[in-house]
Amino acid sequence: MSLLSQKHMLGLADYSAAEIQTILDTSLQMRDILNRPVKKVPTLRGVTVVNLFLENSTRTRTSFELAEKRLSADTLNFSASGSALAKGETMLDTALNIEAMKVDVVVMRHKSPGSPHFLARHLESIIINAGDGRHEHPTQGLLDMMTLRDKYGSLKGLRVALVGDILHSRVAMSNIIGLKKMGAEVIVCGPSTLLPRGIERMGVEITNSLDEAIRRADALNILRIQLERQTAGLFPSLREYHKYFGVTRARLEQASAPLTILHPGPMNRGVEITSDVADSEHSVILQQVTNGVAVRMAVLYLLAGGRAEPSA
Amino acid sequence: MQTKIKAKLVDAAGFSRTITRIAHEIIERNRGTERLGLVGMQTRGVFIARRVAEKIREIENREVPVGVLDATLYRDDYRTSLRQPQVQQTEIGFDLYDLNVVLVDDVLYTGRTVRAALEAIMDHGRPKRVQLAVMVDRGHRELPIKPDFIGKNVPTSMNEEVQVHMTEVDQEDAIYLVEVEK
């Protein structure tokens, strides 16, 4: 009996509340390793992990790479630029070639939703989704939940507002799916042009008023405004966005109790979040980064260990 | 897999006497409790270590620090067993450097868990010396590991198991010999 019923981590949608709980509990033990004199355990010695990042990412890739190294796995980084993909090789061929080199785990980021699922169907390796388009970013959802659990002890009944560009955000999707499974209430807040149609079917409350979200939530997860979206005409200007949806200290003062502030990074200071909020005592943004490494260690440990046939 | 109790090897009174003896032996071997630390292995080793520390305090009137160790991440069988064990807490709240460390476990069998624990301890610091205390040594070693303090030697066959019960997690303090029917 394995602790997880899944072979891959393609999205939190596939995971039960009990499994998410197991990952979060394991993450706490993993975080302890990061505080020791020797920040490394031999657990995944001999396991090879390839970080197949076909869309730019520094933060997530670095976090995964560090998690892999802390567990003593061998790691290989592969990015789209400078690879055979730039020469016209298909993604499947690239992946099959990497697998032919005998890798055990593929951590994958790609701009197209469902691409990790596609690889999972064709490869023997364990696939971990590190973000697929606007679909899911499961380890980000997990690290956000871990950070909230640190603060509140439990996620049950917690009210979390996701603010900003919900439409293009895989972070929002994984948060909504994970938080709902763990019994939290989710409020999504943003301009109507950045809220996906039918989002209410995911069991979330919707508001276009940041003040209302602030009044009702215990924590705000402030999503990054992707500056390139502005040219698509989804909001008139950064200044106007900031005026209505920028989280500032003055707006937060309406809340009866201080709100915990999360942001998946990288931040646009002065757009979706002001510096006095980002650097305030209620901001847990840097804890999120530490927890990210711990959560990824837990996922790697739980998926990549214990896979051989039983010896007896 | 079914189990059948074959014999009760130690009862509550015997259990307490064994803890007392181990505590005395640890003090004697280390010439007191100066620079001494206990590290209990999850789960029951931790309770045994705490009881030994309690006993040492009664005898010597000195506190000995007790740490908690989970060696799961150092095991060598994670690729051969299908089951991925839950990682439990490790908390050693004192500096191991130059300390006489007594590693405490309930049952010593193949020695593989102790090997893993030794590696884990070295990653937490460099003790002066590591000694091993176990409640039961049931034989069948697969590695060159020998305990320094033994509660009870129990010769067993491969289809037997020794179960240490402790009031912290079980109904009683006792040691049972159990037959495993596969």
Image: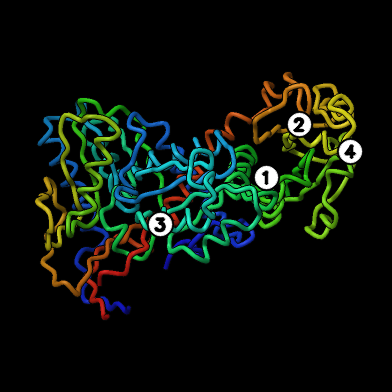
Q: Is B170 displayed left or right of A31 in the figure?
A: left
Q: Are marks 2 and 4 on the same chain?
A: yes
Of the numbered discs 2 and 4, the one sitting upstream in the chain is: 4
How many numbered dots are placed on residues in this image? 4
Q: Is B22 displayed left or right of B172 in the figure?
A: left
User: Whole-percent x and y of residue B175?
Assistant: 24, 63
Which residue carries the number 2 mark?
A227
Q: Could you say whether the residue bearing mark 4 is in a helix, strand or loop?
A: helix
Q: Amino acid under label 3?
A: Glu
User: Whole-percent x and y of residue A257?
Assistant: 78, 31
Of the numbered discs 3 and 2, the one sitting upstream in the chain is: 3
User: Whole-percent x and y of residue A73?
Assistant: 35, 45
Colour setting: rainbow
Label 2 Cα crowd, 10 Å radius (few <14 / some 14-19 / many 20+): few
Badge 2: chain ID: A
- Hey, which quadrant is residue A215 in on the image? top right
**Viewer-nearest of discs 2 and 1:** 2
Query: Nearest the camera: A75 or B161?
Result: A75
**Please, is residue A172 above or below residue B93 in the view?**
below
Q: Amino acid under label 2?
A: Leu
Q: Are marks 3 and 2 on the same chain?
A: yes
Distance from Cα at disc 2 to Cα at disc 4:
25 Å
Q: Which mark is residue A171?
A: 1
User: Residue at the spot x=22%, y=69% of the render?
Assistant: B161
